[in-house]
Amino acid sequence: MPIYDNITYNNLVRPLPEFVEWDWYDIPVVEPQKIDISQVNNGYWLVNLKNTSSKDKYAGEKIVHAFCYDDELYRFYKNPYSYLYRTSGYYAVSTLDFSMSEQMRFPQILHAVFCNRWSGAFMQSYGRICIPTVGWVKPDSYDICFVKYEESFGYNGQGHQLRAFNWDEPFSNGGDN
């Protein structure tokens, strides 16, 4: 068996600390955190993951969202320490929002959800405030995508019917995906 340095080992094996909870699909759970979103666009600004920088002077006033193409997301998933370093000064980050479609089979949806939740649990294990991104595409994917999330838990949701910051009340996006 080869001997790996710590970063290479973590990128291959993807261990998480013992305190991370796992759901019944064996997917890490992103723990609920108190996040003040009342100041979004009135103090806190959203910034796309692609536009983040470790040198951003106003990073503490921004929340990083990860709505971008999967090739960009996989770059950070494959090297989570670069994601951690690049977003270290920001107020909060969202989990990586991997694509799902109605044509995807159960294992593909499960993999997308695993990558999403693993990124959030990884960031939380390093003390970061993390907003879970929840996506679903068809009724039989709902249980996979929302397992272990409570009604009062804040998340950034995306699906065919709804996109919402669901801290208090969901809102319709007019059918836009």
Image: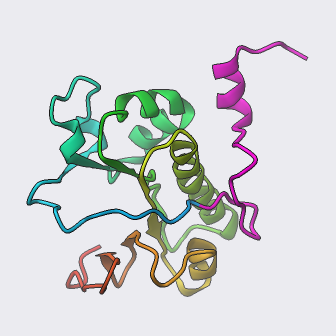
Which residue corresponds to the image point at 60% horizontal and 65% vertical from the top-left? 109
Location of the N terminus by quadrant is top right
User: Is residue 4 located in the magenta-colored stretch of the structure?
Assistant: yes
**Residue 38: where, in percent of width, then height?**
19, 68
Magenta-colored segment: predominant secondary structure: loop
**Residue 14 placement, left or right of 48:** right
Quadrant position of residue 85: top left
* Residue 49 vertical position relative to residue 146 in the rendered view, above or below: above
User: Is residue 109 located in the magenta-colored stretch of the structure?
Assistant: no
Q: Residue furthest right?
A: 1
**Residue 102: where, in percent of width, then height?**
51, 74
Which residue corresponds to the image point at 46% horizontal and 68% vertical from the top-left? 134
Q: Residue furthest left?
A: 42
**Residue 140: where, in percent of width, then height?**
61, 84
Quadrant position of residue 42: bottom left
**Residue stretch in magenta:** 1-29
* Number of dots carrying numbers: 0
**Residue 111: where, in percent of width, then height?**
64, 56
**Residue 166 placement, left or right of 20:** left
Colour style of the rendered protein structure: rainbow
**Residue 11 placement, left or right of 52:** right
Which residue corresponds to the image point at 45% horizontal and 50% vertical from the top-left? 96
Location of the C terminus by quadrant is bottom left
* Residue 70 vertical position relative to residue 161 in the rendered view, above or below: above
**Residue 104 placement, left or right of 106:** left
* Residue 15 vertical position relative to residue 112 in the rendered view, above or below: above
* Residue 57 vertical position relative to residue 108 in the rendered view, above or below: above
